[in-house]
Amino acid sequence: MSIGGQILYEDNHLIALNKLAGQIVQADKTGDLCLADLLKDFIKQRDNKPGNVFCGVIHRIDRPVSGVVLFAKTSKALSRMNELIKQRDFRKIYRAVVTGKPPSTQGHLEDYLVRNQKLNKSFVTQGNTRPDAKLASLDYRLLASSRGGYHLLEIELHTGRHHQIRCQLAHIGCPIKGDLKYGAPRSNPDGSICLHAFKVEFEHPVKHETITITAPQPWENMFPDKTE
């Protein structure tokens, strides 16, 4: 599938892609081609632009995660979107398949997380006694359970900590399917984890209207009896 087939939303200011598991949003130490650069090349060719194409990364999701990623096509849009995120006026909804049933059908998780840079992993710590501990907050609800012992959760993030969903769900005994780093019993064949950035919602930085962008969930066949 070309990157054009991954476009979920586009106007003169913003463009949203449905990131595939394994793609990286922004260039990193691996040197692998990233979505931001692929998007610049795509727009340059599609729109026959003679100069450089602006493509600002508004937010990122982990490499093994799929779903909505939003980019800015102008510096003005990037600046305004960064301010929305800073003010937490940017709603992010995820879907996850987990290998343990949560303690209740819906709940609120609030933990202090510490990031270990060497291991590239976050850990729940007791309170905020450590200076590097950061408050992490999310809500979850159980959408469905499968005969294979998997459970589909919908998660709304209220903070944006490193590996937050992966760490907090594992802490309550619900590691994400395929996520060996956080306690899943086995990996997925394609190296992905079953975490998907399902929806973002925000006020448009120029039009000032509510924009909702959804990326189709990749595991519908696992939960045929799912109810919203």
Image (cartoon, helix red, strand yellow):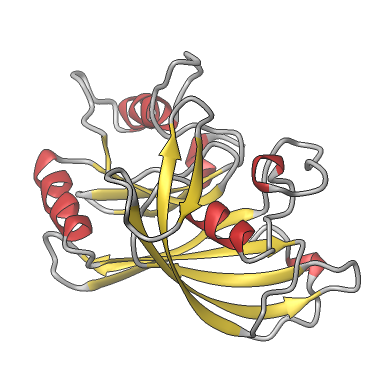
Percent from the top left, x then y, of residue 58? 28, 45
Is residue 133 left or right of 123 when viewed as pictured? left
Q: Quadrant of the C terminus?
A: bottom right
Is residue 53 left or right of 144 when viewed as pictured? left
Which quadrant holds residue 221?
bottom right
Residue at left offset 57%, top offset 56%: 196
Residue 6 appears in the rendering: yes
Is residue 8 left or right of 150 when viewed as pictured? left
Percent from the top left, x then y, of residue 166? 57, 53
Percent from the top left, x then y, of residue 33? 48, 20
**For this rendering, which residue is in front, 158 or 50?**
158
Q: Quadrant of the N terminus?
A: top right
Which quadrant holds residue 20?
top right
In the rendered view, tell whether residue 51 sits above or below residue 223.
Answer: above
In the rendered view, tell whether residue 155 sits above or below residue 59.
Answer: below
Residue at left offset 86%, top offset 68%: 149
Q: How many marks?
A: 0
Residue 216 appears in the rendering: no
